[in-house]
Amino acid sequence: MTFTKTVLHVGFLGSLSLMAATGAANGQTDDATIIAAGTGAARTDGVRLGTAPTSGFYIAAAAGANWRQDADLTLQGAGADTARAMGLGTTGKLGFAGAGPVAVGSLGWGFGNGLRAEVEFGYRSSDVDAVSVAGYPAHPTLSGEASTHAVMANAFYDFHRLGWRVGVPVTPYAGLGGGYAWSSYDRITARSGNDGSMTYGVDGRFAYQAILGLAWDLSGIARGLSLTSEYRYFAVLDQQVEHGARFGRAGFRDARVDTTNRNHALLVGLRYAFRGPGPGAVGVD
């Protein structure tokens, strides 16, 4: 009896398949065709349009434009006392000229669930275009630049459920990072005739950053390849370097000055996952 029921059940399913195929060939739609189409549709439940989660080792690099915010300057110790005796201010601003270069490279690991962790090496630089300190010349001739090298540990989350398709799958992501940054103030000079000031030196401090980005799936070109576009906010805890000034016959050198370091950047780059999905792969809930 069991054998007979099994044969009948298999025969019934086979008949439905045959009816669906016959209906399709004749341009007709019947119940069997609807059942077959419904079965196929069920397989797509939960499919998202974003890229598939990154799993395993990956490398990434990006470059772009960096805008450093005006830095606050605060003279400390004996240098501040000397500046006051000269009739100079002990606080001021260091301004920067538009966009400077920024570049980052990273080694990372994807956990297959949207989470990623990586180690990043970065560089950014900005030319100085303004110094504002009470008692200093109003329009000095300026030269010098400030640059920062950093080693960061970052954590990311890829929002595959929020992905969409613009020709290729696109996935938004967000990240936070912390690490250590060394900033070099390369003989930043403000000069007016024989008077002037100079900020110089190297200092390292804790750094942190926040990242928002989009990953554009390029697996149709190379398996595991993505184009990335990002906004980054990068900052370093207040740094301390040297500062000196001379006005007339009075002056000081090697005074300590605290300075801030805050940056905004836009970057475009590439990320390559060695175990990346093939063309057309999408995230699945």
Image (cartoon, rainbow, N blue to C red):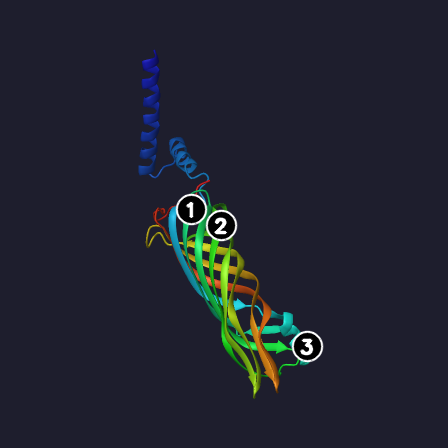
Q: Amino acid at mark 1?
A: Gly
Label annotation for residue 155 = 2
Secondary element at tag 1: strand
Q: Nearer the viewer, residue 96 or 10?
A: 96
Q: Nearer the viewer, residue 153 or 227?
A: 153
Label annotation for residue 20 = none
Between marks 3 and 1, how big is the CA–CA gap? Answer: 55 Å
Which quadrant holds the N terminus? top left
Q: Amino acid at mark 3?
A: Arg
The quadrant in which residue 206 appears is bottom right
Can residue 117 be seen in the rendering of this structure? yes
Find disc 1 in the rendering and name its residue.
110
Secondary element at tag 2: strand
Between marks 3 and 2, how big is the CA–CA gap? Answer: 46 Å
Residue 134 in picture, x, y percent from top left: 66, 78
Residue 226 in picture, x, y percent from top left: 39, 54
**Residue located at (48% from left, 52% from top):** 154
Q: Nearer the viewer, residue 206 or 170?
A: 206
